[in-house]
Amino acid sequence: MKEYKVSVIPGDGIGVDITEQAIKVLEKIGGKYGTKFNFTTLKAGGCAIDEFGTPLPEATLEECKKSDAVFLGAVGGPKWDTLPGNQRPEKALMGLRGGLGLYANLRPAKVYNILKSASPLKEAIIDKGIDLLVVRELTGGIYFGERGRGAEEDVNYAYDTEKYNVEEIKRIAHVAFKAAMKRNKKVTSVDKANILESSRLWRETVVEVAKEYPEVELNHLYVDNTAMQLVRDPSQFDVILTSNIFGDILSDEASMITGSIGMLPSASLRNDSFGMYEPIHGSAPDIAGKDLANPLAQILSAAMMLEYSFNMSEAARDIENAVEKVLEKGYRTGDIYTEGMKKVGTKEMGKLVLEEI
Ligand code: NAD
């Protein structure tokens, strides 16, 4: 029997509610596919501040490094909102990404046929389908570049620097092309090459990497145009490849057009099979502990973990199909509920998915 060591960080708020359901799904799928997941539950975020005085205890990071994958809920909440920036729960996320060397962020945005009405876009646009993947560079660019403040002739100024080297661009481009090979074989590289020198290097490098993937169609769009195209006709996209800052903004836009934040998973990866998997939403303190949270984004994050870290594509499809079947049968948590559907809580939704596996 294959065994994998998974570090589970439920975090705060609904993170606790939804990881509980997703772990049950993983245990069942493990049984079905002859794989044992050894879970270690760790603290990070607000709960770690309360217990250890820091959002990311050294012991948590060290334990994550020893595991095959990290499975994260969400961190944060109003209790810790007044703390200074570097002591806030969200600091744990940056610490985990940096500390684990996770340079590629994958965020699929998909509209399920049965949840079409949740999208804020017009039906004529949605009917063409939305099923795209944003591949965002996660450890470089302006979020990590040199920054500072100063004063010139008594006027204060501040600056941040966008800097990428060829190797950083190449490795993220490979992630995007490899993902496209498993999907519809199209990569749209997003930059601002009409203005930024860093974007011109980005584009040149992506063109070079593309030569290794002759089956994949490559096109380039400026980031401002991409923002428009995402609402005008998102069906044109398969894989969107972009930098840290552009990806931050575009992946939020892409998730918004699906209309259901409680449905969207994500993966943060590096070169080996190791990854960190989490839903894109936050800790939703307004509904935490009330059996109201939608656990499907967390459950779909488990499917991504199977796919990318454990090479268990069939098991991943199994989970995705189970989720789709539950939705087809009309079961909805409050966030995706529409009249005529059957409203269920977090635990019931988890149980329904289990039954379909
Ligand atoms: P949020 O995503 O937590 O919530 C936004 C809205 O969506 C809320 O009304 C919430 O109830 C709802 N929602 C989110 N996920 C849901 C789910 N699974 N089921 C049903 N409804 C859901 O964003 P926010 O309110 O801006 O932030 C709350 C806290 O989470 C903050 O402390 C923020 O910093 C933190 N946060 C953490 C992460 C993370 O851990 N990766 C990401 C974003 C925000």
Image (cartoon, rainbow, N blue to C red):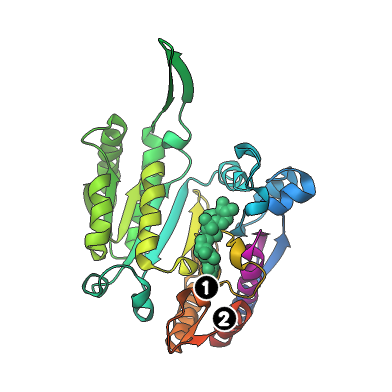
Determine the image quadrant of residue 40: bottom right
Query: Callout 2: 10 Å neighbours few (<14), some, many (20+)?
Result: many
The image quadrant where one finds the N terminus is: bottom right
Q: Amino acid at mark 1?
A: Leu
Query: 270 or 92, which is in the foreground?
Result: 92
Point 29% across, 36% down: residue: 199
Determine the image quadrant of residue 159: top left
Q: Amino acid at mark 2?
A: Met
Residue 41, image x, y percentages: 72, 60
Determine the image quadrant of residue 186: bottom left
Q: Which residue is disc 1 drawn over?
A: 296
Residue 53, image x, y percentages: 76, 43
Check contact, mark 1 vs mark 2: CB within 8 A.
yes
Total number of numbered discs in the rendering: 2
User: Is residue 322 in view?
Assistant: yes
Task: Magenta stretch: give its range.
Answer: 5-24
Q: Which residue is disc 2 drawn over?
A: 349
Q: Residue furthest front?
A: 154
